[in-house]
Image: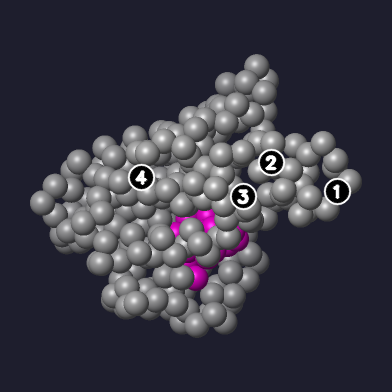
Amino acid sequence: MDLKLEDKTALVTGSTAGIGLEIARTLAVEGAKVFVTGRSQAKLDEAVADIRASGGAKVEGVLADAATAEGVQAILKAVPQVDVLVNNLGIYEMKAFADITDEDWLHLFEVNVMSGVRLSRGYFPGMLERDWGRVIFISSESGLAIPGEMVHYGMTKSAQLAVARGLAQATKGTGVTVNSVLPGPTRAAGIFDFLKSVSTNPEGTPAEHEAEFFEKHRTSSLLQRMIEPQEVASLVAYVASPLSAATNGASLKVEGGLVTTIA
């Protein structure tokens, strides 16, 4: 399917690895000009080379920390206008509620929520003026089913859903859409350290840790395995496409059937 992204420009935050890298790769292979962001020049260079090797010819790196106000300003200066903004940057940690400090709450909110707020504030008005654009927040099923082992993370993912829906209200009658995509547990760097940390057998294999995680901690998952980053990226690429014009203000699940509610 031709997603008609050939003449579009996209920026993906947190895109040197994991879901962000696969989103950037998919958009670039579909013909979009893609800007990847990151804090390490070496990782940026590696990501750009990786995407080009996959057939994504139009890709560039932007060295900046999208988690800070200063970093966002640097991104906006380097790339003043985009057609597609993918707010993917995010972090998580496991911590008992009583141990989550004020600094922990604020740090996760700053990275996971304010990065997208600031970039949307920079790019969204231009999209409305040009009567076309896509803003996509990469949230999580944890925004609907708050995990008890990381309440502060779940809070930030719920906040992203609220911001996205609120922004969507301002697009009425335009060619701009704002949506959220909600992955479930996804295979990415660091995830197996997390699985090992919650396993009853830390000396087991990664496959055993994964199986135990779904058996004991994500029992409602219908997929019963980690989601592959490309499986998330495929949905994001469609939402970024002109073909998705009728999808707006939506929270789109790609979480393996983990959330048991209908809506």
Q: Earlier in the sequence, mark 3 or mark 1?
A: 1
Residue highlighted by disc 2: 215
Residue highlighted by disc 4: 251
Q: Are marks 4 and 2 in contact (CB under 8 Å)?
A: no
Query: Hey, what amino acid is under mark 4?
Result: Ser
Using the numbered discs, state the Cα–Cα distance from disc 1 to disc 2 in whole angstroms. 15 Å
Using the numbered discs, state the Cα–Cα distance from disc 4 to disc 3 in whole angstroms. 22 Å
Q: Earlier in the sequence, mark 4 or mark 3?
A: 3
Q: Is residue 258 above or below residue 238?
A: above
Q: Earlier in the sequence, mark 1 or mark 4?
A: 1
Q: Residue at x 72, y 49 (%)?
A: 210
Query: Hey, what amino acid is under mark 2?
Result: Glu
Range shown magenta: 12-25
Q: Earlier in the sequence, mark 2 or mark 3?
A: 2
- Percent across and percent down for residue 97 are 62, 21
Q: Earlier in the sequence, mark 1 or mark 2?
A: 1
- Percent across and percent down for residue 137 are 40, 48
Asked if the magenta segment contains residue 18, the reply would be yes
Q: Is residue 132 left or right of residue 236?
A: left
Dot 3 falls on a residue whose secondary structure is loop
Q: Can you tell which mark lies on residue 224?
A: 3
